[in-house]
Amino acid sequence: QVQLVESGGGLVQAGGSLRLSCAASGSIFSIKSMSWYRRAPGKEREWVASISDGSTYYTNSIKGRFTISRDNAKNTAYLQMNSLKPEDTAVYYCKAQARAITLRLDDYWGQGTQVTVSS
């Protein structure tokens, strides 16, 4: 099994920055990709960004403001969030596409971390 733990959320004023971390642990054989999603109050969960084989992908609403990165040695992904807006307020979730000791490619999710941006 693979466990994901997010950290780095909190309360920040509009225009501020936060850096989220997602650490993967457990019986990891390999990690194909890592992604961030978010769920704002009263809305569906939406995809935010992904990183796979060094390539990065972003949803349009956060392009130029957020940066996803990954430290393969630490099995950790990061989401640097700059120029935060109140509409970025959400619970942010990390997802990893990974192979555990069974070698089956599965999706694993973290428990989420709250980001609140005040105006």
Image (cartoon, grey):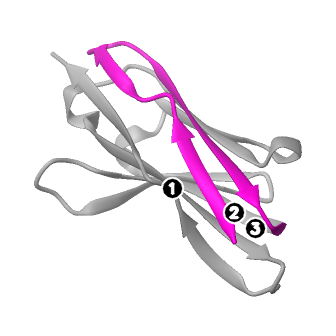
User: Counting residues from the N terminus, which is met first, the one under dot 1 or under dot 3?
Assistant: 3
Q: Which mark is residue 110?
A: 1
Question: Residue 12 falls in which quadrant of the image?
Answer: top left
Q: Is residue 16 left or right of residue 75?
A: left
Q: Is residue 73 left or right of residue 93?
A: right
Name the quadrant of the N terminus.
bottom right
Q: Is residue 61 left or right of residue 17?
A: left
What is the magenta segment's predominant secondary structure?
A: strand
**Three-letter amino acid code at the position of disc 1:** Gly
Quickly name the residue at label 3.
32
User: Does the segment drawn in magenta span residue 23?
Assistant: yes
Write down the region rendered in magenta: 1-29
Label 3 Cα neighbours within 10 Å, binned few <14 / some 14-19 / many ≥20: some
Question: Residue 107 falls in which quadrant of the image?
Answer: bottom right
Q: Nearer the viewer, residue 35 or 114?
A: 114
Q: Please name the residue shown 77% across and 76% down the image.
A: 99
Horizontal and vertical percent position of residue 4: 60, 54
Quickly name the residue at label 2.
33
User: Does the segment drawn in magenta span residue 98?
Assistant: no
Q: Between tags 1 and 3, which lies in front?
A: 1
**Three-letter amino acid code at the position of disc 2:** Ser
